[in-house]
Structures are given as structure tokens and as C-alpha cells.
Amino acid sequence: MKNLLPLFLLFLPLLTTAQTLPKDAISSYFSEYVDDQDFTVVYVSGKVFGLFKDANLDLEDLDEKEVEAVFEVVKDIQGIRALHTEHNAMARWKEAKKRIPTDKYELLFKVRTADGDNVEAFVQDEEAVISELFLLIGAQDNFAMLSFIGAVDLSKLADLQRAIEDN
């Protein structure tokens, strides 16, 4: 027991750090830059998608099967967050690359152009259910982060695709 106390004190900073880590890639950036006038900020609550279903919208271009498939895909989205700026864009992109633990994500794709533009998409998923889709864009005059948080079931995306193809 006497030996456990120093061990516990050694790991205490790691435990408190783990509890304060954001649960998604954009959380710390979003809260840091939400009031910064250099940034365009977008936040869409997951509640919005539920309201659409209850709103009886006129979606005349979609049939009932397609509309239902769309709502099945988006019903578990908890939110969409986006940050964009043209100020110090490349420096912001480099900072984001250092701060975001991308090793906790699976890289979907990466694009780098000859003139230095960068686009990377990451995903966190478990057994065909995506919990976060994260996009990071960096260029000389453009920095953007986009994050979809929630549960997107890939089988429901397949149902949506079939519903659209049937028409």
C-alpha cells in the first residue's frame, strides 16, 4: 500500500489529462475560436435533424421512401461543427496538425497539391457505425475544420442509396 501512493501520484496527471481531452477532434478549437472574428463558425445541433422530421417539410423532389431513408441516416447525428478562416491559414493548419491526435482516427484520404494545399479526412468508427467524420483543410489562404459527430450507421447509408436508385 505504501508503494501504491507514489505510483498513484505519478499517474494522477495522466488521469486528469485524459478526462479533459475533447471527445472529438474539433471541440477544443471550436471553443477557442467561437468568438474570434477572424473565423466563420458553424454549429448545427443534432436536435435540428429531429425537428426536420417533425416539421412536415415539402420535399416534393423525394418520395416517401427516400425521405424516410434520409431521416434514418441523420437521426443519430449529435452535431456538425465547422471553423473556417483565411487569416494565417497555413499557420493554423500546422497548429491543428500538431494539436489533434490524428493517431486516434483512421485516415480516409489525404490530398496535397503541388502548390501546398492540403486536405485530409479522418473517421472514427466501430463495426460499421461512424462516430465522427472529420475533415481538415489547409492552404495558403484557407483553413477549415469540419466535424460530424454522432452515430452514422453505414448500413443505413446503403438503404438510402438503394432508395434513391429505385427511383
Image: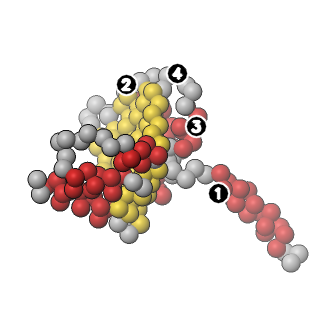
Q: Which residue is farthest left?
A: 167
What residue sits 36% from the left and 48% below the top? 53
Earlier sequence position, callout 2 versus callout 3: 3
Graded by Cα atoms within 10 Å as few (under 14), some (14 to 19) or many (20 or more), the crowding at tag 4 reads few
Q: Quadrant of residue 61?
A: top left
Tags 1 and 2 in contact by the CB under 8 Å rule?
no
Marking on residue 31: 3
What residue sits 45% from the left and 39% below the top? 44
Marking on residue 37: 4
Tags 2 and 3 in contact by the CB under 8 Å rule?
no
- Identify the amino acid type marked 4: Gln
Structural distance between the alpha carbons of marks 1 and 2: 34 Å
Residue that mark 2 sits on? 141
What residue sits 47% from the left and 50% below the top? 78
What residue sits 78% from the left and 67% below the top? 8
Graded by Cα atoms within 10 Å as few (under 14), some (14 to 19) or many (20 or more), the crowding at tag 1 reads few
Q: Percent position (x, y) of residue 29?
A: 54, 38
